[in-house]
Amino acid sequence: MTARRSNLATLRDMGALSVITLLLGAGRELLIARDLQASGDADIFFRGLVAVATVRACALAVYRARWIPADARIPTVALLRDGARSASLLGLIGVLGLLPLIGPRDLVAAASEGSQALALVALALAAFLASWAGHLRALAERRGRELRGFGVDWGLALGTIAGTLALEDSGALGPSLGLLAGLSVGVVMLWPARVRLSLDGPAMDIPAAPTPEATESPGESERPLWLLLDALLYGNLGVVDSLFSHLLIAGSLAVLSYAGLFVNSALMLLTGAVTVVALRMAASSSGGRSMRRWSLLGGAAVTLGLAVIGLLLGWAPIAGGIEQLLGWDLAGSVRPVVLWSLPYAFLRLANTVGRQRRLVRGDLRGVIGWDLAGLTVRSLLLAAAIGTLGLVAFPVAAAAAELLQLMVWWRGPTPDR
């Protein structure tokens, strides 16, 4: 097996490639903002994108927590086979979850229009495939090939851009088909070359290595289920936002998604790299001693970056340039949401780092309790404040939920336990 890259090299290289991912994502969002603006068609695409992103993030969180700390002697083919059923199950959950995200009104409208119905089919297929993308990316990161995982990120953005340009004036169909195509290419790139197309072949890394089941303690047999529940409950920010956005006028989810472009641009530069490194530290005997300090520093760094973005959106040359490019005032629409997202960004990054040790070594059932508390608080706050605050209610509620999530790890198992 290829030796793992050093933590510093992982942070450096994944951070550099995340800049490219950010630029591609920005190009995708701006192109859709130009063609679909804040319309119902844009809402449909972004609801599908929420399903795809949520499933992929959940799968990636689950399999990172399972595969990265796993015994290095376990062959890749054994892990691929072991996760096949749960990856397919999570993909089916994503397909079913797409239905309430779209909503009955839009589903009925799409059924009567061929292009929109085809767009929904493409989004459903992408939601299923997204689970396998997360599974395969975690396997690549375990083998020290974390840079290969960016093929999915780039494929999603480039495919959406190509589909939007190729099928102009087609509503959500162009970006939806492009999203599916780009995701498919990324999955093919991630598939372990020596495994080929069969899961029945011999293990290629170390033939005599134990299977995952053989290395688990009796209590570990339930761990994948708790990891999946944690990922679904903690990684559902987009799902909750999509459901509550039905209470606002058409196009509100699109504006929220455009704001998310700038918020996620600050988060994504660090999240992938710090998660991989945090899991490696959490799996070591002494790595947890600096994780609390590292989580706070990471949160401060991402908040500073987002604050700079918010200030730039209020600068007349930047705001005017965006409006001239797109034909409408996107900067003015999203800037309040971006600025109100500063507390959320700080807490999200801090929790991303800090909770990894609890996921690797702690009581997962206790984590689920805090996940449910965060989901409940966020939903109640949205229900109470969305009529008064509008779109600003979404980052406020998200920050409150993340504040509760601090209890998952801040007072959790001590580093030496």
Image (spheres, rainbow, N blue to C red):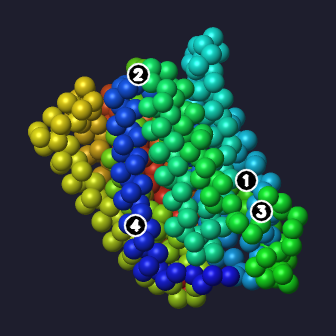
Question: Mark 4 or mark 3, which is nearer to you?
Answer: 3
State the separation of the CA atoms marked 2 and 1. Answer: 33 Å
The amino acid type, in three-letter code, at marker 3 is: Arg
Indicate the position of residue 185 as horizontal and vertical percent values.
61, 50
Which image quadrant is residue 36 in?
Answer: top left
Q: Nearer the viewer, residue 363 or 346?
A: 346
Reading the image, the residue beneath label 2 is: 39
- In terms of sequence position, does the residue under pointer 3 or pointer 1 come before the other? 1
Tell me: residue 379, above or below residue 82: above
State the separation of the CA atoms marked 3 and 1. Answer: 18 Å
In the rendered image, the residue lying farthest to the left is 316
Indicate the position of residue 259 as horizontal and vertical percent values.
34, 40
Judged from the image, the secondary structure of the residue bearing numbered disc 2 is: loop
Question: Mark 2 or mark 3, which is nearer to you?
Answer: 3
Q: Nearer the viewer, residue 365 or 225?
A: 225
Q: Residues within 10 Å of mark 3 (few under 14, many from 20)?
A: few
- Residue 15's tag is 4
- Look at 51% across and 42% down and name the residue there: 159
Q: Quadrant of the C terminus?
A: bottom right
The amino acid type, in three-letter code, at marker 4 is: Gly
The amino acid type, in three-letter code, at marker 1 is: Ala
- In terms of sequence position, does the residue under pointer 2 or pointer 3 come before the other? 2
Question: Mark 3 or mark 1, which is nearer to you?
Answer: 3
Q: For residue 174, say whether it is visible.
A: yes
- Look at 77% across and 62% down and name the residue there: 196
State the separation of the CA atoms marked 1 and 4. Answer: 27 Å
Callout 3–callout 1 Cβ contact below 8 Å: no
Reading the image, the residue beneath label 1 is: 87
Judged from the image, the secondary structure of the residue bearing numbered disc 4 is: helix
- In terms of sequence position, does the residue under pointer 1 or pointer 4 come before the other? 4
The amino acid type, in three-letter code, at marker 2 is: Ser
